[in-house]
């Protein structure tokens, strides 16, 4: 049986003294097979919300109203037709009334978010419990919110060349607040979280400024700098280093072959999305093989790898630092 010492602080937050024995019923609930299914659906529900954010925020629309509508017949989508994943599969991705197809992306985002929550629940709640430690409930919820933000950033940047401030700035603040309350939640002390946040933002904002000043082009978006502010606040220095290094390498490995094959990485051109902005319109023709590639999705991909494979990546970085 699992030793039950010190469960209370992680479950209920700080300020509650650790008790010798925590209700075994709670442990049984957290380890129950259906708890994993709940964790998956928790993720899928938020994935459904992420779809709303991805569609509406770049269009300047409210995320709470009006209700979702079918793009074909304009009828509101009923609650029972809006159950994450299940409704999409039952309706075969079509509107119940007019048969208008819904983009496959809605299903993909819901599944991605579900899998993310499921994987983090096992890693941060169940594995520590089985090993005799405290379940990282706060860590699970916080890292899931971080990962969900990365999914939103990826799609808004691919569609609109936008990394929404309303997503990354509050999340950066959340990371710092959590680090300030308890080091153990994210596994990063506040001083390191602050340093990494400033370093991430400063590096990209600095490179951007130098390019603007000396070559007159916007090599990096300010959104990328704000994304790294969030990454630094959550992941600390090793995570930030991974995100920039692996993000750049994977960005080249993926985008160069795509561009050679004549395919754009983004779903729109920078000019279509921001052509009225004179600062951007001028430097069309710069970028990878003469075409622009959004960096945000690759930074987000590397950050997601860090979320899921943190122990392995930290180990590799420590080994590299020691060998160098
Ligand atoms: Zn319809």
Image (tube, rainbow, N blue to C red):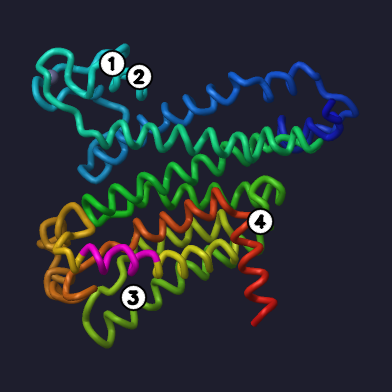
Q: Separation of disc 2 and disc 1 at Cα?
A: 6 Å
Q: Which mark is residue 90?
A: 1
Where's residue 60, x and y in %? 23, 42
Where's residue 244, x and y in %? 46, 68
Do the CB atoms of the residues marked 3 and 4 lie less than 8 Å apart? no
Magenta residue span: 250-258
Do the CB atoms of the residues marked 2 and 1 lie less than 8 Å apart? yes
Where's residue 259, x and y in %? 20, 66
Judged by depth in the image, the label closer to the viewer, 3 or 2, is 2
How many marks do you count on the picture? Answer: 4
Q: Separation of disc 4 and disc 1 at Cα?
A: 43 Å
Name the image quarter holding residue 22: top right
Judged by depth in the image, the label closer to the viewer, 2 or 4, is 2
Where's residue 208, x and y in %? 33, 75
Within 10 angstroms of label 2, few (less than 14), some, or many (20 or more) residues?
Answer: few
| SS state under label 2 | helix
Q: Separation of disc 2 and disc 4 at Cα?
A: 37 Å
Q: Quadrant of the C terminus?
A: bottom right
Residue lying at 17% horizontally and 61% vertically, measured from the top left: 270
Is the stretch drawn in magenta largely helix, strand or loop?
Answer: helix
Where's ligand 1: which quadrant?
Answer: top left
Mark 4 or mark 1: name the one nearer the start of the chain.
1
């Amino acid at each position: 049986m699992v030793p039950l010492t010190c469960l209370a602080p992680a479950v209920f937050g700080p300020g509650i003294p650790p008790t010798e024995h925590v209700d075994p019923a709670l442990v049984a609930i957290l380890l129950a097979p259906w708890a994993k299914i709940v964790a998956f659906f928790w993720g899928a529900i938020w994935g459904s919300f992420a779809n709303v954010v991805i569609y509406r925020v770049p269009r300047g629309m409210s995320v709470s109203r009006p209700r979702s509508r079918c793009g074909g017949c304009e009828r509101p989508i009923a609650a029972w037709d809006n159950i994450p994943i299940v409704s999409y599969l039952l309706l075969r991705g079509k509107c119940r009334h007019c048969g208008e197809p819904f983009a496959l992306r809605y299903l993909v985002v819901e599944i991605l978010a579900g899998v993310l929550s499921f994987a983090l629940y096992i890693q941060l709640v169940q594995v520590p419990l089985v090993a005799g430690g405290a379940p990282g409930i706060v860590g699970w919820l916080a890292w899931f919110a971080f990962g969900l933000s990365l999914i939103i950033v990826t799609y808004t940047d691919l569609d609109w060349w936008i990394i929404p401030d309303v997503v990354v700035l509050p999340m950066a603040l959340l990371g710092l607040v959590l680090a300030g309350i308890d080091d153990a939640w994210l596994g990063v002390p506040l001083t390191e979280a602050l340093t990494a946040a400033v370093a991430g933002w400063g590096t990209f904002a600095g490179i951007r400024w130098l390019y603007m000043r000396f070559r007159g082009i916007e090599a990096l978006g300010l959104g990328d700098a704000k994304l790294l502010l969030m990454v630094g606040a959550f992941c600390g220095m090793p995570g930030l280093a991974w995100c920039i290094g692996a993000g750049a390498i994977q960005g080249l490995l993926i985008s160069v072959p795509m561009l050679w094959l004549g395919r754009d990485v983004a779903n729109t051109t920078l000019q279509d999305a921001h052509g009225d902005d004179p600062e951007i319109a001028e430097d069309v023709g710069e970028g990878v093989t003469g075409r622009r590639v959004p960096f945000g999705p690759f930074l987000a991909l590397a950050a997601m790898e860090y979320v899921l494979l943190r122990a392995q990546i930290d180990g590799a970085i420590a080994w590299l630092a020691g060998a160098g």
